[in-house]
Image: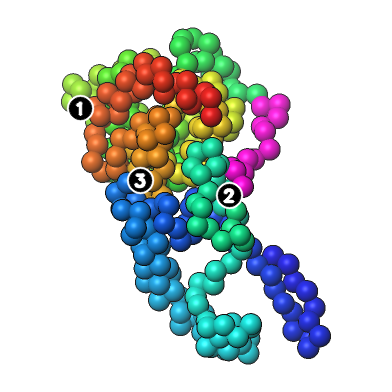
């Protein structure tokens, strides 16, 4: 954001918007839907309806109050054009054009820049437990759901699904707790199945509350996650095949696009899967030479 002095004593504030995925009106990409679910002829209409009903309408009273306090017109922008909210600002989109092309119908003041990366984790020293785990066997499968959060039942369901998937596919795993709190401690060990999962996790899974993705992902065989923009970027940057189990927002679009681009597999919305589906997907992906090559190449 930049501000410059105006002759009248007002300050002109120049704004840039940024987005972590494609949210700008376009005929080329669907909005928060699985790729191909919405006909491309309807994409622009869906964008406009979302902006009008989900953003503009709820925020309009507050926006008008703020404009009134600032002495701004409630009908026009400063250049005299009709007031439109939210305004169409210059925008930088932090997605890679190697993953999805910049829409050809975007105006010149909107640009896809590529993923924005945090500085590499320098001089990182993992714990002795983590070092020993990585040396003890084949590269593990990462499973984590980032900032997805729910009630204790959500945590239990997700943790059970994750460990069941690893057991079914006979894979070692890294279980990242995250906001969902993934852990084998919530397994129902009163049943034979739960006891079996707990025993498998004790021997084959390491649990971490958090971990730098740029260090961990290159040491994994594959990554399984919710399809959030940041985790998608980290997995693709590491060159690892991805399984997406979406929860909300842009995640179904990321997951479906990863499968269509043959960079991994999309397991659908998380509410519609259990332990076995991701367990079936993992070995299928790890034996798909085309997926592995494409993920490494991108």
Q: Residues within 10 Å of mark 2 (few under 14, many from 20)?
A: many
Query: Badge 3 is on which residue?
Result: 35
Seen at 63% across and 90% down, the residue is: 71
Camera sees residue 50: no
Q: Can you tell which of label 1 and label 2 is closer to the viewer? A: 2
Residue 100 locus on image (x, y percent): 49, 42
Q: Which residue is mark 2?
A: 112
Give the magenta range: 113-124
**Would residue 157 appear left or right of 117 to someone viewing this image?**
left
At numbered mark 1, what does the secondary structure look like: helix, strand or loop? loop
Instruction: Categorize mark 3 by other alpha carbons within 10 Å: few (<14), some (14-19), many (20+).
Output: many
Residue 215 circle label: none
**N-terminal-most mark, 1 or 3:** 3
Secondary structure under the numbered disc 3 in the rendered image: loop
Give the mark nearer the N terminus: 2 vs 3.
3
Alpha-carbon span between mark 2 and mark 3: 18 Å
For mark 1, what is the residue?
190
Residue at figure coordinates x 52%, y 83% from the top left: 82
Q: Are marks 1 and 3 in contact (CB under 8 Å)?
A: no
**Cβ atoms at labels 2 and 3 below 8 Å apart:** no
Front-lying residue, 246 or 294: 294
- Residue 122 falls within the magenta-colored stretch: yes
Q: Is residue 43 above or below residue 240?
A: below
Q: Quadrant of residue 243?
A: top left
Q: Is residue 227 visible?
A: yes
In the picture, the quarter occupied by the N terminus is bottom right
User: Disc 1 versus disc 2: distance between alpha carbons?
Assistant: 52 Å
Residue 232 spot, x, y in % from top left: 48, 38
Name the side, left or right, on which 154 lies relative to 113.
left
């Amino acid at each position: 954001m930049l501000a410059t002095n105006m002759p009248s004593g007002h300050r002109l504030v120049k704004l840039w918007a940024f987005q972590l995925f494609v949210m700008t009106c376009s005929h080329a990409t669907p909005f928060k839907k699985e790729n191909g679910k919405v006909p491309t002829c309807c994409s622009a209409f869906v964008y406009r309806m979302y902006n009008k009903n989900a953003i503009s309408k709820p925020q309009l009273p507050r926006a008008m109050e703020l404009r009134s306090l600032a002495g701004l017109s409630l009908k026009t922008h400063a250049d005299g054009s009709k007031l439109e909210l939210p305004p169409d600002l210059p925008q930088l989109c932090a997605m890679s054009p190697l993953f999805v092309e910049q829409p050809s119908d975007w105006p010149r003041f909107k640009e896809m820049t590529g993923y924005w990366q945090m500085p590499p984790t320098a001089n990182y020293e993992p714990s002795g437990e983590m070092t020993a785990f990585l040396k003890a066997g084949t590269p593990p499968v990462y499973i984590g759901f980032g900032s997805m959060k729910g009630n204790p039942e959500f945590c239990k369901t997700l943790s059970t699904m994750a460990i069941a998937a690893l057991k079914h596919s006979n894979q070692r795993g890294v279980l990242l707790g995250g906001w969902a709190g993934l852990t084998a401690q919530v397994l129902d060990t009163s049943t034979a199945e739960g006891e079996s999962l707990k025993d498998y996790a004790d021997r084959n899974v390491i649990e971490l509350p958090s971990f730098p993705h740029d260090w961990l992902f290159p040491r994994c065989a594959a990554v399984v996650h919710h399809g959030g923009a940041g985790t998608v970027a980290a997995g693709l940057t590491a060159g690892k095949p991805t399984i997406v189990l979406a929860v909300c927002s842009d995640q179904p679009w990321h997951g479906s696009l990863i499968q269509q681009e043959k960079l991994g597999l999309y397991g659908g919305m998380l509410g519609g899967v259990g332990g076995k589906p991701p367990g079936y997907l993992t070995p299928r992906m790890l034996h798909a030479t085309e997926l592995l090559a494409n993920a490494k190449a991108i």
